[in-house]
Amino acid sequence: MSSKKLLPAEEALITDVRGLIDEARASVAFSVNAALTLLYWRIGRRIRLDILGEKRAEYGAEIVASLSRQLIVEYGSGFSEKNLR
C-alpha cells in the first residue's frame, strides 16, 4: 500500500467500497451455500424416492457410491459419498 496520506473523502470512499465488497462476498457465499444445500437435498430425495423406494440400505449405499464416482469425474470432489449422504 502507498504511504501517501489520504484525504478524508478518499478514506470514506475506500471504507465504503470495502464494505460493498465484503457485503457482496457474504451474499455470494450465502447464496452458494443455500443452492448447494438445496441441490444435495434434491439429489437425496431423488435417490430415496425414485431409485430406492422400499429397497434395502445396502443397495442405497451401492447407488450412492456409484453415483459419487460418476459425478466426481464430471463435476469434481464436491460430490463425494460423504457429501451425497
Image: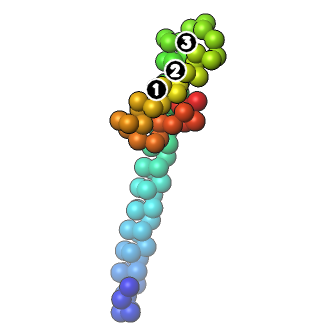
Residue 27 versus residue 22 in the image, above or below:
above
Marks 3 and 2 sit apart, C-alpha to C-alpha, by 9 Å
Name the residue rendered at 38%, 68% in the picture: 17
Marks 3 and 1 sit apart, C-alpha to C-alpha, by 13 Å
Q: Which amino acid does label 2 sit on?
A: Ile
Please report whichever mark, 3 or 2, sits nearer to the chain's N-terminal start: 3
Q: What residue type is labelled 3?
A: Leu
What kind of element bears circle 3? helix
Of residues 52 and 30, the one nearer the viewer is 52
Name the residue rendered at 51%, 37% in the picture: 80
User: In the image, which disc is placed on residue 67?
Assistant: 1
Residue 45 in view, yes or no = no
Name the residue rendered at 56%, 8% in the picture: 53
**Residue 15, how many percent across, how many down?**
43, 73
Residue 26 versus residue 52 in the image, above or below:
below
Residue for badge 3: 52
Residue 47 in view, yes or no = yes
**Residue 73, how many percent across, how many down?**
38, 36
- Dot 2 and dot 1 residues touching (CB under 8 Å): yes
Which is in the foreground here, disc 3 or disc 2?
2
Question: Quadrant where the C terminus lies?
Answer: top right
Report which quarter residue 1 is drawn in: bottom left
What kind of element bears circle 1? helix
Q: What residue type is labelled 1?
A: Leu
Of residues 67 and 22, the one nearer the viewer is 67
Marks 2 and 1 sit apart, C-alpha to C-alpha, by 6 Å
Of residues 64 and 33, the one nearer the viewer is 64
Residue for badge 2: 63
Of residues 37 and 6, the one nearer the viewer is 37
- Dot 3 and dot 2 residues touching (CB under 8 Å): yes
What kind of element bears circle 2? helix
User: In the image, which disc is placed on residue 9?
Assistant: none
